[in-house]
């Protein structure tokens, strides 16, 4: 985690996918919070070491607000949790709805394109705004859970009103939104013609499922407006 800035000064116990159990144990935490889907395999090991473990998941806005309330209760900070929930719910309500179709795309090292399905966290951002996700109903495929590979032909057939691109590689690597504009068939996409090809922030749209969904939703709404 690199947000908020105070997180940078906290001890590092490795990545979310491959944490150092030794470093974690050395901190002697009163509570370990894990992500229920991607980190479930660590729960038995942590339990055997005598650590208290709490699992949370983010598949819906209800998950986000309920987990904040629950964590606030567990750590004895219910007032701050309640205030955070009120802020998130009021801002999401103020975001309203956007009656447009959308594809949210990411690429791999081989330049294949994958679209976020409504069931993914990335897709949830568009769901909150009531947008029509053109990747609905597709099967999972490729290295990104909740995403489905889409050929150029399939993207052209979908021809959504809005395209959000997510670039995994750090700068100075070219942004996916720039690369797509260089692919001749895509020039005719409605989203490019109407200037609704949007580069989404990697952290907000892929790496930080949780309370910051409100920032992603507001960014998407404002970019479309």
Image: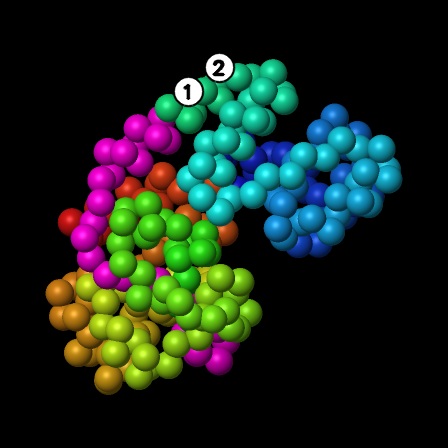
Say which of 8 and 100 sits in front. Answer: 100
Q: Residue furthest front?
A: 137
C-alpha separation, residue under disc 1 versus residue under disc 2: 6 Å
The residue under the point 35% across, 30% down is 89
| Residue labelled with disc 1 | 83
- Above or below residue 142? Residue 212 is above
- Above or below 213: residue 180: below
Looking at the rendering, the stretch of residues picked out in magenta corresponds to: 87-113
* Location of residue 132 by image quarter: bottom left
10 Å neighbourhood of mark 1: few (<14), some, or many (≥20)? few
Instruction: Tell me the quarter of the image containing the N terminus.
Output: top right
Mark number, residue 39: none
Residue 79 marker: 2
**Which residue is nearer to you in this view: 10 or 66?**
66
Residue at coordinates 33% horizontally, 45% vertically from top-left? 128
- Across and down, in percent, residue 198 comes to 27, 60
> On screen, 175 above or below 38?
below
Q: Is residue 4 left or right of residue 201?
A: right
Q: In the rendered structure, are the residues bearing label 1 and label 2 in contact, judged by CB atoms less than 8 Å apart?
A: yes
Left/right of residue 70 with respect to residue 33 in the rendered view: left
Position of residue 60 measured from the top left corner of the image (x, y, whole percent): 45, 44
180 in magenta: no
Tell me the element at label 1.
Answer: helix
Left or right of residue 13, residue 107 in this image: left
Residue 161 in the image, given as x and y percentages of width and height: 20, 64
95, 206: nearer the viewer: 95
Where disc 2 sits, the SS reads helix
Corner quadrant of residue 28: top right
The residue located at (16%, 49%) in the rendering is: 225
């Amino acid at each position: 985690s690199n947000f908020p800035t105070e997180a940078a000064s906290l001890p590092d116990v490795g990545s979310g996918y491959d944490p150092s159990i030794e470093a974690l144990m050395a901190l002697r935490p009163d509570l370990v919070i894990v992500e229920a889907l991607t980190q479930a395999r660590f729960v038995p090991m942590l339990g055997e070491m005598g650590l208290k473990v709490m699992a949370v998941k983010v598949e819906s806005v209800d998950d986000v607000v309920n987990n904040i309330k629950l964590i606030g209760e567990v750590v004895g900070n219910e007032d701050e949790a309640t205030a955070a929930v009120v802020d998130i719910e009021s801002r999401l309500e103020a975001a309203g709805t956007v009656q447009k179709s959308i594809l949210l795309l990411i690429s791999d090292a081989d330049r294949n394109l994958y679209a976020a399905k409504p069931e993914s966290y990335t897709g949830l951002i568009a769901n909150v705004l009531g947008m029509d996700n053109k990747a609905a109903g597709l099967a999972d495929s490729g290295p990104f859970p909740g995403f489905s590979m889409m050929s150029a032909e399939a993207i052209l057939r979908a021809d959504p009103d809005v395209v959000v691109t997510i670039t995994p590689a750090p700068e100075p690597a070219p942004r996916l939104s720039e690369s797509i504009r260089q692919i001749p068939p895509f020039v005719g996409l409605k989203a490019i013609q109407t200037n609704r090809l949007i580069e989404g922030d990697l952290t907000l749209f892929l790496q930080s499922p949780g309370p910051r969904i409100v920032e992603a939703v507001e960014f998407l709404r404002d970019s479309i407006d």
